[in-house]
Amino acid sequence: MLRNFLAAALRNLKRNRFYAMVSVACIAVGLAATFLAVAYLDHLHSYNRWIAGYRQVYGISLSYTLPGLAPLDLETTPLDIASWAEANVHGVIETARIAKRRPVVRHGDVEGFEEIGWADSSLFRVLPMPAYSGDLQHALDRPDSVVLTRTLARKYFGTEDAVGKTLEIDRKHPMVVRAVLEDLPPNTRITGDGAVGMFGAASAAYSPMSLARGEWSTFSFLHVEPAVTKEQLDAGLSRYSLKGSSVKVQLRAVPLDRLVYSRDRQAVVYAMPLLAGLVLMISCMNFVNLTTARSIHRSTEVGVRKAAGAGRGALVAQFMGEALILSAVGMLIALSLCELALPVARTLLDAPMTFEYWRNPTLIAAIVAITVLTALLSGFYPAVLLSRLNPASILNGGRSRTGQSRGLRQALVIFQFAMLASLVVSVIVAGQQIDHLLKMTQRFDGEHMLLIHHASCRRAFLDELRTLPGVAGAACSQSAPINVVTNNAAAKRADGTRRSFEVVRIDAGFLELFGFRPLAGRFFRADQPADITAPESTAVKRVVISATAVREFGFESAEAAIGREPFPGSGTPMEIIGVVDDFRIGRFAEPMYSTVYVAEPSRTQLLCVRLEGEHLPETLDRIDELWLRLGDPRPINRQFLSESIEFMHRSIVRQRWIFSAFAVLAVSLAIVGLLGLASSAAEERRLEIGVRKAFGAGTSAIVRLILWQFTKLAAAAGVIGCLIALPLMRRWLEGFEDRIELQPWMFAGACVLILGVAVATVLGHSLLMARARPITALRNE
């Protein structure tokens, strides 16, 4: 019997090649999107699971609240939290810390910036990692110790057997390689790029500042007893507080395999399976539409088989077998599509994921389960519908009663186009929001603003730099306007309330370099010695504040703030000499901070250079030559401001491209579904159209009749889709401090696009039906 079912299924697929190919294509696209989503989620769920005993290791994240501001989340912690947790939290066996830096590493003629982690000697006991050579358990016990991966060992020594050899950190700290790690897999965030060295906490390669209590850039890990739960750890960590500080801190324990879920990734993590599932549902609906649309052509076959004694169960089994065959073929094509799309997906998702399903039993099981589920979803209703046909009516010359499925097919098309409308609205809103945010950075030209990191800003170097051909100006700062080093402070206002603000140390001419003009007062001037704050000075600090600070500090206007002290009687006295417009200094999802600028060039570490638009390569070569002659002894570390902006905005840009990619897939699949419904309508209304034409109806009247049948469905779907998208987009926009307002044209544009796709899809088929000779439809009646 199974052989007969298979033969009948293959004969039918061969007889209806076109519809079979369209069905397979729809299923393949839906499965490919779903498989990529599964591969991405499998990649995320594999993070850090290669570490032995990962279930007993937790990271610590925190949420801190500054006076007057909303809570902010960090994945790093103050330096002392790990030791506090080991002493005060029940069930903690041992702790470890690591703080990532990018110092200059040198051996002989090989030199470069590398990601090197300052770490406790307990790191490799808390986080066991595979060793290539050396004793990892005690590799970081001595202060002059460093551990390298095999990649870094080959880079600097030409061999992986580097134990006992010496490196230089920042050209002044000799470090001895005590162990060599195996190259770590890409599914970890502990080591960043995977090529990482580590040296001990007592190492002289760090200044005492790195060991201060105020250092908030440390990753802290807890090794706990097997019976300890996350809830117990959270309860213990909740007792931590910053004594004598107005900052409120809330600590949380994060399982080691969940550390990948940063705030930037969460939207993508949630969106990927939902969008992929939506595309797969549309694919299954298309299969249902196409199968039921062709049911008229299979009615005779069903009648003959029933007359010969076949039961409904046998017919359902046959039609489900066809669906399973099509799904299996679609699965094979989907696997090939995944291999082709994988490089694009890696770039789009910023994830080094793989799709080696043949090595992963979990992936194989997921692929098989999804394929079978697709066959059931897409084949069950058509199988039941076809098996219910009446053989007496069919074999007596009657027509099969497929009109009962018309309502379901129309509902499916409405659902498809409603989801499509929601996606289109999402793409429009996301595009407008991202464009709005990026316009905020266009007030200065990031393409021609060069940032030189870790620059000491020596006056001789700076003065000669400004005279180079192609250099329009230069100034030093603690940070660039977009990629700021966080330096929060808080003080009491005259009315007793506390306000937080950001302190940014700059040099005279920095604000002018970025094209800003004072809203009131003036900026810092190099010819005014009182404007420049000397190290450890107790004199009155002259400051420039932002427009937000004017409001937060309680001044009536920018002009009213000039000459005033923002926090009378609170700490070091300050005098406001100018007000500057706000500009983004962090991620766009964060609130706009009050900012206080202090001219303190001795504490700057970033050199900003504005270049002229022509001969950029030659100008960069001149800057490099000057750096070698007068600059820091370390290699120059430079990048354009536009690169920094692009890096910071990569998360929301990624969301935009993901929405767009799935919208394109949804449009393509919805078009196919509409073609299936149009084909069904052609068969069901063939007699009606023939009669209308026989009584004189013209081609245009027939086309309008058919188009109205589908445009009303598309219009209803557009309205439903817009109603679905409205609350979702409102909630998405709430994640941005500076956001656009939803406009009616965004939803109207989506509806117009839906109607356009529907008309363009059905128009060609409508013309063929309207131009058909009526005798073709009436000769058998």
Image: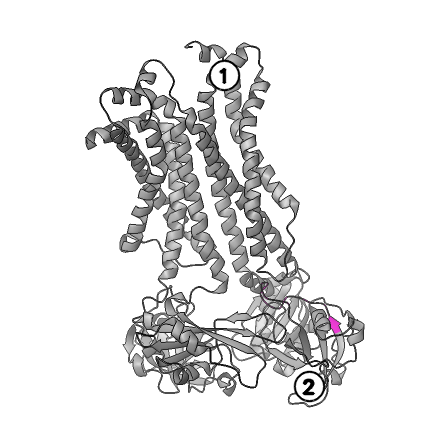
Task: Answer whether residue 68 is magenta in the image.
Answer: no
Q: Nearer the viewer, residue 561 or 534?
A: 561
Q: Is residue 721 above or below residue 471?
A: above
Q: Could you tell me the amino acid type at mark 2?
A: Ser
Please state, as top left, top right, bottom left or bottom right, where the N terminus lies in the image.
top left
Res. 57 in view: yes
Write the residue at 48% across / 85% down: 211
Q: Which residues are magenta?
A: 579-592
Write the residue at 24% across / 31% down: 6
Q: What kind of element bears circle 1?
A: helix
Percent coordinates x, y for residue 99 in the rendering? 45, 77
Percent coordinates x, y for residue 738 in the rendering? 64, 61
Name the disc covering residue 570, or none: 2
Write the residue at 38% across / 39% down: 27
Q: CA distance from mark 1 to mark 2?
A: 88 Å
Percent coordinates x, y for residue 360 in the rendering? 28, 55
| Residue under label 1 | 688
Residue 88: name its quadrant.
bottom left
User: As drawn, is 715 to the left or to the right of 311?
Assistant: right
Q: Main secondary structure of the magenta part?
A: loop
Residue 292: name its quadrant.
top left
Q: Nearer the viewer, residue 195 or 676?
A: 676
Q: Could you tell me the amino acid type at mark 1?
A: Glu
Q: Is residue 628 above or below residue 740?
A: below
Q: What kind of element bears circle 2?
A: loop
Percent coordinates x, y for residue 3 in the rendering? 20, 31
User: As drawn, is 128 to the left or to the right of 704?
Assistant: left
